[in-house]
Amino acid sequence: MRSAIIAIRDRLDRAGVLLSGLCMVHCVLGVVLVGVLGLGGGVLMSPAIHRYGLVLALAVGLVSLGFGVMRHGRLGPLVLGGFGLALMAAAIAVGHGLPEAVLTVLGVSLVAFAHIRNLHAAC
């Protein structure tokens, strides 16, 4: 049973890294396609996509990083991930544009790094 929980937590951390990367690609492509080419603004920049993405990031991040603290006792990944999630939430609050892109990229980078640290701390 314990090994199954560890496997789930590890998968969640890996999913967190993948989702962070996809979020970053979405953000950069959105800025390029909408800002430079004027394409896809209605779909790519939809506030609903960003809200659902943040909810998913919060769920995966808090569960996997929280389980990590219970497993290895290190708060660092959880604090780092929490700060990254806060930056992602701030990005939604500032609206579309360069500030949103910068906050999002910084936030997802920190969240991805926190998941990687969480995986390494568990070894």
Image (cartoon, helix red, strand yellow):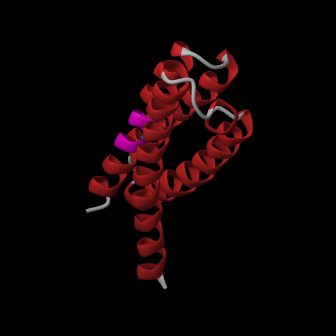
Q: Is residue 16 toward the left or the right of residue 54 in the image? A: left
Does the magenta segment cover residue 112? yes
Prevalent SS, magenta region: helix
Total numbered labels: 0
Q: Which residue lies furthest to the bottom in this view?
A: 1
Q: Look at the image and tell me whether residue 48 can be seen.
A: yes
Q: Look at the image and tell me whether residue 107 can be seen.
A: no
Residue beneath the point at 48% across and 62% down: 12
Does the magenta segment cover residue 114? no
- Magenta range: 107-113
The quadrant holding residue 77 is top left
Q: Where is residue 16 in the image (x, y as percent from the top left)?
A: 46, 53
Q: Is residue 67 above or below residue 76?
A: below
Residue beneath the point at 66% across and 26% down: 92
Q: Is residue 99 toward the left or the right of residue 75 in the image? A: right
Q: Where is residue 65 in the image (x, y as percent from the top left)?
A: 48, 51
Q: Where is residue 57 in the image (x, y as percent from the top left)?
A: 57, 47
Q: In this view, does 100 lie above or below 42?
A: above
Instruction: Indicate the quadrant containing the C terminus: top left, top right, bottom left or bottom right.
Output: bottom left
Q: Is residue 17 toward the left or the right of residue 100 in the image? A: left
